[in-house]
Image: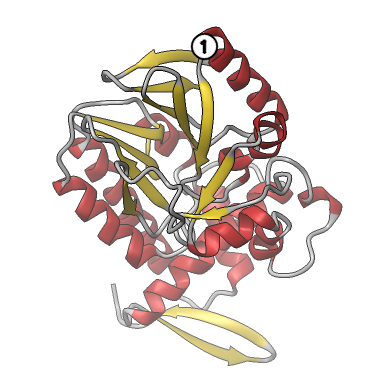
Amino acid sequence: MYELIQVSEACYYINCPAKIGVYRTGKKGVYLIDSGNDKDAGRRVRQILEKNGWELLGILNTHSNADHIGGNRYLQGQTGCRVYAGGMEAAFTQYPVLEPSFLYGGYPCKDLRHKFLMAQESRVTDFSHDSFPKEIEILPLPGHFLDMSGFRTPDGVVFLADCISSKASLDKYAITFLYDVEAYLKTLDMVEEMEADMFVPAHADAAEDIRDLVCYNRDKVHEIAEKICMICKSPRTFEKILQRLFQDYGLSMNFEQYVLVGSTVRSYLSWLKDTGKLSAVFKDCELLWQTAFPL
């Protein structure tokens, strides 16, 4: 864990739960792509940089999930580096309580206000700032989170953030977090056609060809959508749909999984309603979801 792996002349990644990219520019300057899940991750990253004689010039955040920005505060405090983020991700990075609040749909109880879902705040510079490394291409990758981005380096490495999960993760957990299902499917289509010398997803192995894995992720989305439609052949409340999915996929429920999977299921319900596959009705002070046509 936290092994530095080189993937091109100028690019590396630090192998940890959410891979941290390293782009080297010049002899000593480096930019990180994300920063790990907490202060300890930041400390380990700093040790790697010092061992190699590298100076941290900035952190490029793909998105604001806590496991990707958790090291920002420590590294920024130690080095004074800029943290770059864009769109709504910038707001969540500056005000991390927004993540558990968003997931829960209200003020989060203490069970949700911890480093797994809420990083420490960091000062943010927008991608549009003149100091952003112009040689790095920003790749919009919406769907998983609000305004997630990937990055393409000049030597042909694409850092894909969380837009694809490993087969092992999908087989084990089935329902991975999604904010916008339609946007996510479009992102998968785009990534499938993308060319690069090396792809580095945050939660899957780096590879020269990721098309099969993209298809596996897409198939899982459609599998979950079909399962929700089957569950809703009879009118169901959100809680009953969620309970059935946890049971069918053998998932264990706690506060974290309730909000992560629950938020994702709400996104599926929105997408299925907007595409005419589900209907919704208010009856006896309950919101009921039902398949809109016979399966």
Q: Which residue is found at the position 72% from the left and 46% from the top?
A: 254
The residue lying furthest to the top in this view is 51
188 horizontally vs 51: left or right = left
Q: How many marks?
A: 1
| Residue 253 image point, x, y percent | 67, 47
Q: Say if 156 sits above or below 193 in the image.
A: above
Q: How is the image coloured?
A: secondary structure
| Residue 63 image point, x, y percent | 50, 50
Q: Tell me which corner region of the image, top left, top right, bottom left or bottom right, holds residue 217.
A: top left
In the image, 227 versus 267, the foreground residue is 267
| Residue highlighted by disc 1 | 53
Mark 1 residue type: Gly
| Residue 23 image point, x, y percent | 39, 28
The N terminus - image quarter? top right
Residue 16 visible within the image = no
The C terminus - image quarter? bottom left
In the image, 24 versus 210, the foreground residue is 24
Q: Which residue is found at the position 57% from the left and 43% from the top?
A: 82
Q: Which residue is found at the position 64% from the left and 61% from the top?
A: 103
